[in-house]
Image (tube, rainbow, N blue to C red):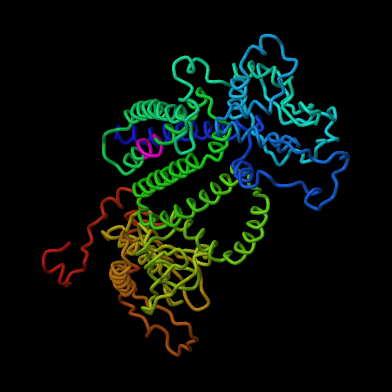
Amino acid sequence: MGIQRNTKRVTGFVCPILSMGLSVLCLFFMVENRAAAQPSLKEIVAGKESPAKEEPEKSKGEEPKGSKLLVPEDEFGRGTPRASVEGFLAAGKKRDYERAAEYLDFRYLPGWVSTIQEPYIARQFTIVLNRALWIDPTDLSTDATGHQDDGIPSYRDSVGQIEVEGRTIDILLQRVPREDGVFIWKFSNATVAQIPRLYQEYGYGYLENIFPDAFFDLRVLGIEIWLWVGLVAVAIAAYGAAYVITTLIHLFVPSRPSVSRDQFSRLVRGPGRFLLFLLIGRILFEYISPPIWFRAVLQARTVITIALLWVTFCLVDLMLAHLSQRFERQGKSSAAVIFPPLGTGLKAVVVIIAILVWLDNLGLEVTAILAGLGIGGLAVALALQRPIENLISAITLYTSQPVAVGDFCRFGDNIGTVEEIGLRATKVRTLDNTVVAVPNVDFAHAQLENFSKRTKIWYHPQLRLRLETTPDQIRFMLVEIRALLYAHPKVLPDPARVRFQEFGPFSLNLEIFAYVDVTDYGEFLEVAEDLNLRIMDIVQRAGSSFALPSQTLYVERGKSQDSHLAHTAEAQVREWREQQTLYLPKFPAEKIAELRGTLGYPPPGSPVSATGGA
């Protein structure tokens, strides 16, 4: 019992806390990147697919608003803001920092910045943009004069903003004169002056003092070597931490085998450990400052979504296993049939929600999808209204269990034995030996009378005696029938009564109220038959008889009754009255105890009695 209580305590306390903690962490990671204007994976993919998409005005062959100059010819393609930025990014990607430096304005720089070699500054700027700012070239102007309505001087265009120590630094392009006097676009000298400071914040830090530049510039499968090394180190540390945590949690699981324990152990060691590995790795990965494109890939959270689905599936299985054990302890083991379809439905709903969240993380607009699901869901709900009602009614029948398979019951105007409680209908075999399939919603709402739940059966006949019966004859019968009920071993003594109930239109009515201590209806009929025969003997000994619902014209009084027996009964009543043993209106408790079980049953002469029965 103590182990069972511990198992219940673990599954009812540790598991909800674990799932709640994981949910809080997941929600934290789902929202923590929103405030940083993080580009979505969709935006990155779209940007890579169409980096040179033209503006609508130029695609139509119209002169852009405010344009006064044609795009100048330039060896490096610096005639427009978009072309200049694209050229710089392409040169940085190829690690051609000599060429990348041609896109930076090195005029009028502070003295300490001007001492740094121009290719090295271009390399630093490439690394900063790669790690701190996502640039969508399609947002930049293709006009030689740039954007004229962006709220900044006409000779400048904004590329973006980077946060450094609580301060926002604008990344700007500026129209500057070339050696021949032609105006081209470069990153402004105000931006170039901030590159060393930006690199201190978003560079590789002390790692550059340990590893050579090639460690950060060379790529394998499109990813820098340092990032591969960082991923491996983070994976090892995260898995080690997740393994230790889940092992400690597993120590609290009792060792006694059970379905709940196995499900909980599978949850902790499987999806729980995998999800903790991902979450811890996500925290540790921030310390190596991954590139912004890699952050966008992480923001989609494809792997975490799969892990959460895995955890949710195991939680559903654990919950259903726990409920199945609970119902089995309560004697409702047949209710387990509803758990597989219920678990499948819950998992389907979770998968749909996970897909919608994943699409939203990708940057797709899910509003239209939700609207379509709402309209389609309404149609499906209307179509499935009746099946859903039957399913809910099946769950109600299994959980509350007014009837179970094998029970003999009355439902509405029908009587039969329940053979199956399905997800749609309940099958009942009637007294005609036919099978009736009743929809669960109708069966659950019908008035159910379960005969199999009886602990005793009511014996309630009414004796209609002839009007010529005398009061002493009735007293005789009342005493003898009560003695019969108290003495019969199959009749419960409390309550067991017989009363002179009323004067009927053609009879004097006696009411018998007692319970037979049996649950099988066939056995009850046997006991009732014995009681009826013994009561007929008592009526006969009293010299009376049963009345018929008819009108009778008596020509000669007394021939219909045995006067001798009537006098005998009346004499017996007089004797009881003289001895003060006329037990009316009730028997004393000591007399009931004295009579209890003294009557032989089955009656004398039956085969059971002849073979030594009671």
Instruction: Give the side of residue 394 with respect to residue 123, left or right.
Output: left
Verify whether residue 268 appears in magenta. Answer: yes
In the image: residue 462, left or right of residue 359: left
Which residue in the rendered view is the most extreme toward the front? 180
Q: Residue at x 77, y 28 (%)?
A: 178
Query: Outermost residue, left direction?
Result: 611
How far across and down, in percent of the image, does residue 171 sit? 71, 26
How many numbered circles does the render carry? 0
Considering the whole magenta stretch, tell me its main secondary structure.
helix
x%, y% of residue 23? Answer: 51, 35
- Residue 568 shows in this picture: no
The residue stretch that appears in magenta = 267-273
Q: Quadrant of residue 513?
A: bottom left
Name the image quarter holding the C terminus. Answer: bottom left
Left or right, 141 with respect to 245, comes to right
Question: In the rendered structure, does residue 309 fall within the stretch colored magenta?
Answer: no
Between 110 and 4, the one lying in front of the other is 110
Within the image, what quadrant is residue 8 found in? top left
**Closer to the camera, 258 or 444?**
258
Coordinates of residue 29 in the picture (x, y in percent) = 55, 32
| Above or below: residue 178 compared with residue 354 | above
Snapshot quadrant of residue 292:
top right
Pick the quarter of the image with the N terminus: top left
- Work out whether residue 169 or residue 187 is closer to the camera in this orientation and state it: 187
Visible residue check, residue 569: yes
580, 474: nearer the viewer: 474
Residue 188 in picture, x, y percent from top left:
74, 24
